[in-house]
Amino acid sequence: MLSSIRHWFIARTRWEQAAFAVWTIVLLFVCTRAFVAPASRTVYPIFSESTRLWWQTDDLYEPYRPNHVQGGYRYSPAFAILFTPFAIFPDAIGGVLWRIFSGACFIAALAWLTRSVLPGCLSRDHFAILTLLCLPLSVQSLNNGQANVIVIASMMATIAAIREQRWNLATALLLVAFICKVYPIAFAMLLIVLYPRQLLWRMAMAILPSLVLPFVAQHWDYVVDQHQKWIELLLADDRTNADDRNKHRDLWLLIDIYHLPVSRFAYRIIQMAGGAGIALLLWIRQRQGWDEKHLLISALGLGVSWILVLGPVVESSTFQLLAPSLAWSLVASVRESSWSARRLILAGSGLLFVLAAALGSLGNTADLSIIGIHPMASTLYFVYLLSEPRPIGELATPTETERLTAM
């Protein structure tokens, strides 16, 4: 077996070998740490203990949650049920399996996205480079055992499924993302704007099983009680007046740090207007005849950017959602023959994210909130995506297109 692996590795290109080696080292490190110290600097015990509490009909949510387990569970009861295959193991083993599963889902979804959706003729080297560029924003979530890895994998796979017109699969993948986190519903709404006939009724029907599943798994009174406590917890999470270290890392943090004249009410209007504006922009691009590949990649990037810049819950690990879109933008920018304002904006965003990842590895990432590096980087990338012109490949002659896409 080792000989087969060696021959397979030798047959790869240098970029593929580098990507395989780096990802293997990262996963070995995080899995070893998870096995040796399963309760240290990780959210995995929150998930596993919540699943066990669910099957024991104990409270999942603060302030009712038992004190002997790690607090901080903010996910739906359905997520606790889906996490059962990992929670049946001791945390040292389940934590390793969860990280391997998450990493494998992310790479597989990225490969599917690259093959089916990303514009241009990407080589094996380009895919390897994409995986490497995704690492700086992905390491923290993999290391901590965050569900964000599964969320963005589901979102990427949804885009690929839509491109292949596999509507039922796309809906199921959207549902997985929604069960893991609430905010992907905003991404689903953008896709419904683009494909109302195919997705609207499917999404409406798909939400029903996610609501029914907990009632099948436990008795009625307990399920109703847990859903009520979950909603109360989400509504009570207001960090508007928290100190800068504990605020959400969104545009509001920049407004607060730099004392910009924007009220909280005005910010709410900006949030809603931003979401509606993105939906309108994508609808216009579709009506203008944008190639579907460019349109879907634009929807993924803009949807994730809205979540990070104007969304309801943005923490340092949440920025992992931006990794695939940002990586693709960096690769695609190489096609430009000269520096432009948009390219400088992208470079600034990328450098800030790298700086945030580097500084975060040296200490507590909460310290970065004092200057707002994360929201600065995501806001710059949001501006970059909003200013995207009609893709040049659609306007070029066949010869020019071939030259531009033969990377």
Image: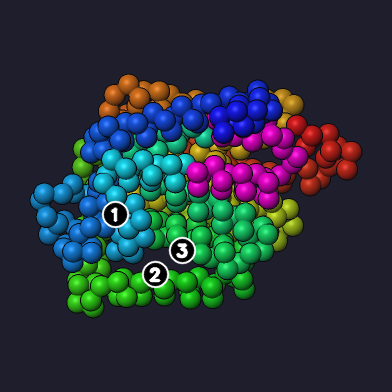
Do labels 2 and 3 touch, CB within 8 Å? yes
Q: What is the secondary structure assignment of the residue under circle 2?
A: helix
Whether residue 270 can be seen here: no
Image quarter hosting the N terminus: top right
Q: Nearer the viewer, mark 2 or mark 1?
A: 1
Image quarter hosting the C terminus: top right
Mark closest to the chain's N terminus, 1 or 3: 1
Q: Amino acid at mark 1?
A: Ile
Q: Which mark is residue 210?
A: 2
Q: How is the image coloured?
A: rainbow
Residue 236 left/right relative to 138: left
Mark closest to the chain's N terminus, 2 or 3: 3
Residue 125 part of the magenta-drawn span: yes
Question: Which stretch appears magenta?
Answer: 104-133
Q: CA distance from mark 2 to mark 1?
A: 21 Å
User: For the point 67% across and 64% down, which residue is it?
Assistant: 165
Indicate the position of residue 241 as horizontal and vertical percent values: 21, 45
Q: Amino acid at mark 2?
A: Ser
Residues 206 and 97: in front is: 97
Q: Which residue is mark 3?
A: 175
Q: What is the secondary structure assignment of the residue under circle 1?
A: loop
Residue 91 left/right relative to 142: left
Q: What is the secondary structure assignment of the residue under circle 3?
A: helix
